Amino acid sequence: MKDYLLGLAAAALSVSILSSFLRKGALRQVFLLAGGVFLTVQVLSPLVKGELSRFSQYLAGMELRQDAMESGIEVENREIMAAIMKEKTEAYILDKAAALGAKVEAEVEVLQGEYYPYPCSCIIRGVLNAEQQRQLSFDLEHSLGIAEERQVYLP
């Protein structure tokens, strides 16, 4: 494929340079016509040589490589968003617990939704009395959407 494109560029450059040496007139017009035919033959040479399938395979390969690159970027972006969601949710839980007078550690599990990641469960380690746990649990369910049954409290 590289040879084909280089040959095409060389042919176009050759016709262009040689035509610049000719004065305006019939000879130049004939040369430009012949150069156009020559370039057309160069462009269509894969058809003549039966290499069209190789050319189409090359283009298909380029498309697959492009799709793979885009998919890789999308996956990386989702992973970054999930990590940010996890970090921010854990910080939110720590702040809410501190506001209730409790010192805890939080570990949040984040799942990938259709468009964005979301916190689905959490493990909270620390000492909370019954009222602190109830208030924190209520807040997590209503503010973050983490269902009470998906909240685990450990000492």
Image: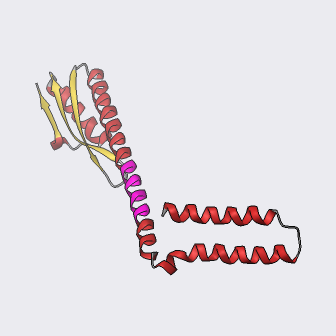
Residue 110 in which image quadrant: top left
Residue 77 placement (x, y as % from top left): 38, 45
Q: Is residue 155 left or right of residue 34?
A: left
Q: Is residue 33 magenta?
A: no
Q: Say if 153 sits above or below 75 in the image.
A: above
Residue 10 in which image quadrant: bottom right
Q: Is residue 104 left or right of residue 96?
A: left
Q: Say if 61 sits above or below 146 in the image.
A: below
Residue 55 placement (x, y as % from top left): 46, 70
Q: Say if 46 sits above or below 3 in the image.
A: below
Nearest the viewer among 56 and 1 is 1
Residue 66 placement (x, y as % from top left): 43, 57
Q: Say if 21 sits above or below 141 in the image.
A: below
Residue in the picture at 31% in, 34% down: 89
Start and end of the magenta stretch?
Answer: 61-74
Residue 54 placement (x, y as % from top left): 42, 71
Residue in the picture at 31% in, 45% down: 118
Q: Is residue 64 left or right of residue 10?
A: left
Residue 84 in which image quadrant: top left
Residue in the picture at 31% in, 28% down: 91
Magenta stretch: helix, strand or loop mostly: helix
